[in-house]
Amino acid sequence: MPKAVQSSCQNFSDPQPYTAQTKPKDKSQAPQQIGIRFQYGEELLPPCVNIDALPPEAASRLNLDKLKNEGKHEYSDLKKLAKQYKDYGIEVIRHEIVDKNKLKRQRQIRAMETGGALIGTVVSGMSLVSSGIKILFSSLTGGNTDAGYSSLKKSYFIFGGTGGLTGLAQDSKEWFAGALGMSAVSTFMDLKDPIALGLVSLFDGAQSMGMSDVRRRENETVSSVHKSFTSHLPGLKWLSLYEQGIFSFFKNITNMDLIFKEEPARAFQAAGGGLGVAGGGLFGVGIISKVASFLGHEVPEKIKSLAYIPYALFSGANLVALFRDGNKVLKRANNYGSRLPGENTAMRVEGWFRRLAALVLGTSKAMLAIMPLGISEKVYDLARATEALGVSFASFGAGAQTAQNFIRTDKLGPEEEEILEYKIDKAKAVESAYAFIKEFENEHREATLSPRYQEVIDSLADEKLKVILQDLDATEIKKYQGTVTQAGILVPFNADRKDRYRYIRSLHERRDFTHLLRTQHFLYDYYSNKENVDPDIKNLVESNTYSLPLAGEFHDDGHLRFSHGAEQILLDFKNFESSLDIVKDKDSEIHKILLKHLGIKEIEKICQTLGKLNADYTIVKIMGDYLEYCRTGEQSRTPGFPKWKLNKEALWLTKQVRYFKDRSGKIKAGFTPAGAHAVAAMYYDLSVLHHNDTNKHPFVMAPQYILQYGLQKRGIKRSDLIKYTESELLKMAYDAVKESNGEEFTQEIRRTSGGQAKDGAKDPEKTIYVVNEDGNYYEYDEYLEKAPDNLKTSFPELYAGMTKRRAAHNTSKRYTTICHAV
């Protein structure tokens, strides 16, 4: 049971709502406060950002008319703004707001492509299975395989159309071209011919690199770029991705970690480049063979079959990546909740079929590789039959991935889009950014845990919890997090908010822990004094004494150098997945400490919370992570963002948390009406304003892209982001960029915000529930319109302000950035 509350400022015994601040009778006596406070009943809610009165430095970044009238985020005239930052070397070529009708048509086309791909997946998949079984049966029984091969050609023809539509549905030209090309060669050519095998390898490589690029775009990652030849050739820029894959292959030819340890999506690019190299070689061998035959020197079939060996080897690397990618998708589906209905099921289907496809196709390639030994022709038949089955499984996996377009419909396309195209001088960008960072490093003072937070911990934590914290502080993981900058890579454009970069991950986690420790104590006290409490809810508040606050203490332990910046350097790396892995890992220091003091059941509860699988995850994100980010921590250093006091506004929000059971009987977390308004405003400030305008502003990202490019030039891996300090890594990036004179590259980054995106109001993780004292509950948007207290007429300013903010937060918007680095 929680320890008895000692401090008067932590007194939770009164179940009545806490009054944030009553409206002052004399306005002249009201304290000066950043932000706006909406009135709700007799209360003035805690402050949120006043979008009608932003400070000049923040206002200069935004289209203020759009913000004030619609609550929507849109950048100001970036061509004009760029002139103020000449040291960056940025020249804005295009800043365009895409017509909404055009976007609507694009969504309709994408929906038709997705629907066609799904129908084709079923038809072509079943056809390939049927053809493969026919060849397999005929070969094993000594029958004629001609009918099976005839059927297989038709199956591959159908598969080509399906694969092409899948590529279009994933918005990948390489995926589209690769699928059509492989289908055409398999349909109309004899794969015993090295020319045909070479073409299959080339197209397979294109499809693999397309898959890698889709993952890259999903994670807003700058891809590995080397000096490009094709980007300077008229009409051949589309080959640049293929070119970079080949460069990546040669750069990583001896890097086994890339195939077996690094994020699997990274391996697709290098493996695709390898398939391209092998395909080119096989094609050349085929041409030489044809010439020799024309001159009367027939090449023996046994010699020709040697071509299968390099093809099988390079395909093998690609299939290892496919298997590991399937594993990762399955892990995400099984370990993490908070998804839309049907999404986890589609992910499980995708993961299982990808793994199965990799194993079956691997068997097929192995059989082809032993063909030069002169083994029976039946081996070739078995290889082709097995290949047909493997391709069908891969098709089913891709179909399940594509089906998610209809589940998370924002994947079909955004409702709004803003495009920025610019040139950036690499040398100027890296010089200005690096000098600014070094100056900050020399002058900055690291933020530390304030006495007020320590007082809460001393007051509420029992002796066991205090010992656990002491043991955790001595671990290498916590020491490492004490060197990781929370806000990422500082750049000059954020000079007016550079104090944010004083915060470190370990401090953020301990402050999260403090908020959650206090929340757990309040909930225990509240439900202990409340009558007729549901027994399941009562059991929950009596059992999460340790798991709730400790989930906050561990939720960011998976971060690497530069925090979220590492997710743009690596490909498909998620810090929250790594955080859960650390707690689960029986060999980790964290797991051993928890096992020693709490036992395996408490570890499982913490993992459930970190995995977004229970009601406490909502509390961890809102009352720990977001409250600390946006109101009491680093984002309160952003101009226009109010700072809440720990024992005033933050304590008030703690008292608004409620558990409830939904109609299916599942326990969820919500807030009183007043608390829900405050949380909705906090979400808006964090996601729509701060995320888009501070973390992801194009002039923030531009020099960061160049530094990330430098790190990739150095071949930085995940292990390097643990081994080296942030200062050492930035020096490596700086040196690499300085050495890259004459190299140019173009990167296109797509980022979606709002709607069903990870920072959008329609994402299940961001659902806000309003819980009334009578037990009735609403989703927040429904509550705005159907509230029993009739917000529209009773509190018109609050209703107008929150309706505008929610409409903006519910709108999906894509920011497309095209960066030409010279």
Image (cartoon, rainbow, N blue to C red):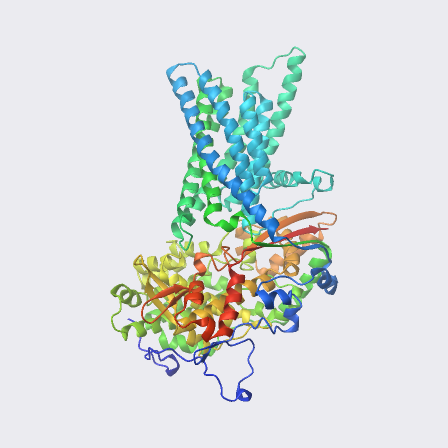
The residue at 58%/24% (across/down) is 196
* Place of residue 681 in the rendered image (x, y in percent of width and height, measured from the top left): 50, 69
* On screen, residue 646 above or below 153: below
Instruction: Residue 709: tell me if it is visible.
Output: yes
168 or 5, which is in the foreground? 168
Occupied quadrant, residue 437:
bottom right
Residue plotted at (25% across, 73% down) = 531
| Among the 4 quarters of the image, the one containing residue 620 | bottom left
**Looking at the image, which residue sits at the far front?**
793
| Left or right position of 631 against 654 | right
Q: Is residue 103 above or below residue 689?
A: above
Q: Position of residue 335 (x, y in %)?
A: 39, 51
Question: Percent x, y for residue 209?
Answer: 57, 39
Locate the N terminus by quadrant: bottom left
Q: Which is more toward the observer, 789 or 456?
A: 789
Determine if residue 483 is in view. no
The picture places residue 268, in percent across and down from the top left corner, at: 54, 40
